[in-house]
Structure formats: structure tokens, C-alpha cells
């Protein structure tokens, strides 16, 4: 779940409602989570932040990082979820699932080059055994690529590209999943704003149930699919292929599909 899980924003009972909704799934399969702005972002009370980020957290001049959690500072998520201990708790971590290596980053914490998070991600990418996990999935909340008009978020996407796009390209990351935008969008395999077969396919899937983002879409040459409807993604793999589908909530039909070939 790529961030903005319950939209509780300080109302504890909404978390309980959310858990009742996801319980039929989460009791059967690992329910791994990513930190969203509505779980974490704050402008005061940083001394209560379980991630121990300095001061009031990450507030770059080019970003729109405000008080979107309404004071939660990730506390409800911290006490309700767990993650492998190879990173920084629920904030950034990695794990293998089948033949996929999955890296979860936090777009809500400092990810700039040289930061603790950046250094950890670079080191994790270096250590992946592509014979054991030929596919690599990278996940974060705010999107690196999206084509809807939202200038402040576009600046964050540029910041993400400056920090991570070369790393994703160097280590041949197959796909990156993002949320934040309440729409579905898939890019071509892209690098530096141009379709490139050696690049990473980016998928925004922020369509679980909150209102859809109806900002106008600007046509981009790297945008391969755009759907403004509620739904979710499924992933299935063989040794040589990864099939990703967007499934419409209403009728279960397939709205989009892409098949990625293993590079290793």
C-alpha cells in the first residue's frame, strides 16, 4: 500500500474502520506499507516523531511538505505496522517476495543525495542478487513521474528524479510504484524524460477509494496509460516476465496491462 492508507488525520476511529476493511486481505498475505504525507507530515511536535527525524522533519524549499497528517507524525502507523529491520523501521526498508526484490522508500523524509535514506537505498541496490530476484520494484508515495497539473508536486517529482533516477537506471530497476495522485497512470520505460528500453516503468496507483484527482492532464510523450477510476494493481511473475494489471473496482475488468521482460 503506497501511502495515505486511512486518511484518519488524527481521528483514531477511522484507523479502526480501515483495519476492518483490509482485515480479510491482511490476515492472509503480508500487508506491507509505505509512508504517505497524510500519515507523517507535520510542522510542530517533532519531538514525538518515532522516526527521530531532526527538527520538524523534511521541508525542502521546493516541496509542499506541510501538516497533512494533522498531528499524527506517523505514530499510529508506527505502533500498528512492522517492517524488516534492514532499513529504518517502517520508513524505508526492503524485502524479497518470490522473485521480486522490493524497496520501500519514504518521500516524506530527506531523500536527497548524501542523506541517510539515499545512502541506504544505494547500498541496498548494490547488494541485490539478480539471479535470485531478477525483478526489482521500487516504491514511494509522491510520484517521480505524473502528468496531471499540480505545480508543487511536479517540483517534488523533479527532486525525486535528481536524487534517484540515475540510481534506478544504473541498477536496472524494472518498475517504480507511486501513490499521492488519486488516479492511475503508467509510463513507458523512461529515463530523463524520454522513453528508453533500459529505463524504469513508473506506475501511479492512488485509486483505492478516496476522491479521484480531477486536475487536467497534460499529454506527455512518456505517458502510456491514464485512467481516472477506482481500482488496484496485481503483479504476477515467471522467471522471465512480470505482468502488471490495473483492475477496475466496480466490475473487476482489466483496465491496463503491461508485461515486462527480465533483464537478467
Image: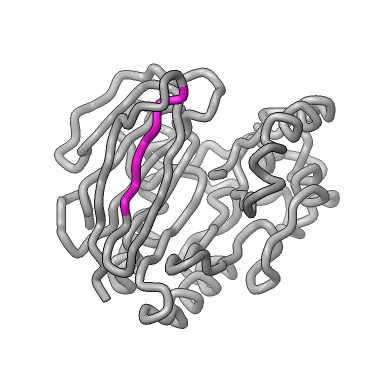
Q: Give how far across and how far down residue 124 sits, in percent.
A: 50, 75
Taking the magenta stretch, the answer to whether it contains residue 247 is yes
**In the depicted structure, whether residue 132 falls above or below residue 152:** below
Q: Where is residue 192 in the image (x, y as percent from the top left)?
A: 22, 55
- Residue sitting at x 33%, y 37%: 146
| Residue 67 visible in rendering | no
Q: Main secondary structure of the magenta part?
A: strand
Which image quarter: residue 109? bottom right
Q: Which of 133 and 114 is in front in this view?
A: 133
| Residue 84 visible | yes
Q: Quadrant of residue 50?
A: bottom right
| Residue drawn at x 44%, y 44% as measured from the top left | 178
Query: Which residue is pictured at 39% across the width and 53% down the height?
Result: 236
Q: Give the range drawn in magenta.
A: 243-249
In the displayed structure, would residue 65 be above or below residue 248? below
Q: In which quarter of the image is the C terminus?
A: bottom left
Of the pair 104 and 44, the residue shown nearer to us: 104
Along the viewing direction, whichever of 174 and 192 lies nearer the viewer: 174
Amino acid at each position: 500500500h503506497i501511502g495515505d492508507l486511512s486518511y484518519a488525520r488524527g481521528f483514531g476511529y477511522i484507523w479502526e474502520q480501515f483495519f476492518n476493511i483490509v482485515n480479510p486481505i491482511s490476515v492472509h498475505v503480508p500487508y506491507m506499507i509505505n509512508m504517505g504525507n497524510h500519515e507523517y507530515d507535520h510542522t510542530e511536535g517533532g519531538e514525538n516523531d518515532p522516526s527521530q527525524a531532526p527538527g520538524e522533519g523534511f521541508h525542502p524549499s521546493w516541496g509542499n511538505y506541510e501538516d497533512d497528517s494533522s498531528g499524527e507524525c506517523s505514530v499510529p502507523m508506527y505502533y500498528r505496522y512492522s517492517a524488516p529491520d534492514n532499513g529504518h523501521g517502517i520508513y524505508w526498508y526492503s524485502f524479497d517476495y518470490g522473485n521480486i526484490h522490493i524497496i520501500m522508500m519514504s518521500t516524506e523524509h530527506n531523500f536527497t543525495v548524501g542523506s541517510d535514506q539515499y545512502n541506504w537505498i544505494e547500498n541496498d541496490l548494490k547488494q541485490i542478487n539478480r539471479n535470485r530476484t531478477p525483478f526489482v520494484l521500487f516504491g514511494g508515495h509522491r510520484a517521480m513521474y505524473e502528468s496531471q497539473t499540480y505545480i508543487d508536486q511536479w517540483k517534488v517529482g523533479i527532486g525525486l528524479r535528481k536524487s534517484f533516477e540515475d540510481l534506478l537506471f544504473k541498477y536496472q530497476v524494472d518498475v517504480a510504484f507511486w501513490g499521492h495522485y488519486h488516479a492511475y497512470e503508467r509510463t513507458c520505460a523512461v529515463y530523463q524524460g524520454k522513453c528508453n528500453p533500459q529505463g524504469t516503468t513508473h506506475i501511479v496507483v492512488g485509486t483505492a477509494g478516496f476522491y479521484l484527482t480531477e486536475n487536467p492532464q497534460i499529454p506527455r510523450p512518456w505517458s502510456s496509460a491514464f485512467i481516472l477510476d477506482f481500482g488496484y494493481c496485481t503483479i504476477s511473475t515467471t522467471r522471465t516476465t512480470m505482468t502488471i494489471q490495473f483492475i477496475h473496482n466496480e466490475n473487476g475488468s482489466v483496465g491496463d496491462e503491461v508485461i515486462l521482460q527480465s533483464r537478467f
